[in-house]
Image (cartoon, grey):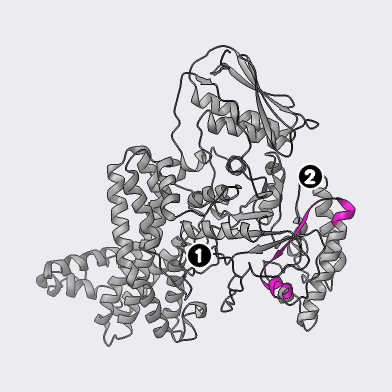
Amino acid sequence: MTKQAFTISHSTHVVADDLTNPVLKNAQMILQRDIDRVTTKDDVENQILLRLDSKGSLSGDQYHINYDNDRQVTITASTALGVLYGAVAVSREILKIDDFWYWLDTPIAIHEVINWTRFALSLPDYKVPYRGWFVNDELLIMGWEDHDSNTYVWQRIFETAVRAGCNVIVPGTDINSRLNRLPAQAFGLMIAQHHAEPLGAEMFAREYPNLTASFVKYPELFRNLWQKAIMEQKGTSTIYSLGFRGQGDKPFWLDDDSRVWTEQAKADVINQIIKEQYEMVQQLDPGAPTAINIYGEVTAMYNSGLLKLPSDVIEIWADSGYGKMVSRRQFQDNPRSPVFSVPNPQQHKRGIYYHIAFHDLQASNFLGLLSNRPSFVSAELAKVSDHHMDTLELINTGSIKPHILYLREVSKAWLKDYQPRTDHEIVSEYVNTYYSEQHVNLTELYLKYWDAIVQYGPHTDETAGDELAPYLIRRIVKAWVGHANQLPDTNWLVGDVDMDEALIKVDAMIQPKLADWQQLLLKVRQTMLTLDSADARMLYGDFYISVVNQAQGLTALAAVIQAYQTAQKATSPDDYLKPFLLVDDAYRTLANIVFVEEHHLSEKWRDFYKNDGYNNVPLSVEKLKFLRQYLRTLGDSDDEDDWERRFIKTPSEARVMTLWTTRRELSDDKLADKLREILILKQ
């Protein structure tokens, strides 16, 4: 029997049988693009046909690849998404294009032609029916363009989601979620909705900015928004989100002072709204699936038996924000109610909203890797399956690029045969996939990241991400300069204590890990010098930036705390000299984070972090620059020349003053540099 073989070359054309179908059009574009990237030589004219057969025998999104002859291979599925899955399977398995090629800039092996003989590719055996990404807290993506286009970036997000096995997506937050509905559906993805945007409707405060967002006061206005949203999405693949939160993702009663809100009164409003929304969906878009997020304040209603849900709604339960399947902390309130043990008397289908990236304005990870270990996430996701909470899994991706390690593992956890894996198994496979050399050394480097993580709470999963340091630095500066008695917004971290005690507690929390971070930072820098250019770029973008944010952030925080504690003992102007230099250290250390981000080894990513409005390291740098000047104002003379005269100038120059001065005062930067030179000479 002659072996079936199909030559992929520059002469191979990908043809869709219906280019009016946007999903097939994207499938054709992706596969043709990848063929053109991988092959260099013209050969026999042939084609790969993408065919949608909605009446065929294939179930769900399964696809079939058939070798017709040496001039044609056909990829067939009964859904457009199935055809796209088949196209990216060829890209992955035959052309060897990695699923995360766009985000990791993975090198591509170039061939004159490719001899394709393995046609028995199939959709992985997924146990999770609805597999989704929630592109949330997407600030970095919002502020970035590639190929002079933000639209192009979102297209690559949707492509990557499909490659990773998604069939569902929440395509951004607020305005983004509506702008990106059609583009996401053009990649075959079903649309789910943010828990604060029921039915995908416009936020009430946007439509009626001068009115109180009260369903009690304006029920018809809310109903009109909901009806409009359903009609816009009617007939499309959509999972409608039921529920009601206040404007800005908070309990609705905080926006509504129309009555005294007892627990029953709150539940009555929520139940009425859920019933109306559900009936509206069934009337206008019959058969469409619905879901409700048991999240925040709704959790208490559910656990108290106050919440009334339709029988076929999917319950979505959230993790802590840090990957633990317990209720999320709300300010100081941290009951950590276990999710897995919640009774399900109505036998509703259940799913999860799970964070591998998170923004809580306090201690989570935004710019870097999750602070909890990969093995921890692996184990939690396995428990989700064990407890039958895997009907729908929405994974908060953040801005995607910093979180690929975890996103890959989530994709594996969606498979039927998935078993929990160790840190070493997860990281070594990742390193072996994306680096060409030094696999053992690089695996050890990655693993040291979680060894250095600061634990901020009594539970082992209460670990500090890269947001903690800049968050605290900004609050210390304001409280210090404002002579506040307490460090604001930190009771969750240190309790109800005065500022001095708060900083003692924070310092005790971070000091044991500072050396680990600096050692890891040095080791990563040394390792980059020994890698080839592709591996060095990979390490820089995938790991070094995470390490820099943690190491330099915490080091700067420690220096600010020491500066504060030293300044509190000041009895003379010169006692502010040391705090001035400590804050200068902190300023330069934190500014190094911005420098590293802006000088990425890959030019493509140099402005990716410019819209960092969460960690907001640039703002924290400016705060430290201000604090440094504040301390100089307290310690130096009115004309800011006394420290220079007494500590920097030679005695003869300082004493002979025929002219009061021969130049302007030194800048804070220059003064700090000169003072350090003097201190070094005196050692």
Q: Is residue 592 above or below residue 263?
A: above
The N terminus sits in image quarter: top right
Q: Is residue 222 left or right of residue 365?
A: right
Say if the magenta span includes residue 300: yes
**Residues shaded magenta:** 281-302
Say if the magenta span includes residue 246: no
Classify residue 44 by image quadrant. Answer: top right
Residue bearing mark 1 = 364
Q: Which residue is at 79% across, 53% downward?
A: 289
The three-letter code of the residue at mark 1 reads Ser
Q: Nearer the viewer, residue 318 or 357?
A: 318
Q: Residue 236 got which mark?
A: 2
Q: Position of residue 384 (x, y in %)?
A: 61, 59
Q: Dot 1: within a 10 Å radius of its alpha carbon, few (fewer than 14), some, or many (20 or more) residues?
A: many
Classify residue 550 by image quadrant. Answer: bottom left
User: Between marks 1 and 2, how big is the CA–CA gap?
Assistant: 35 Å
Classify residue 429 by image quadrant. Answer: top left
Q: Which residue is at 77% across, 77% downward?
A: 266
Q: Position of residue 460 (x, y in %)?
A: 46, 70
Q: Secondary structure at mark 2?
A: loop
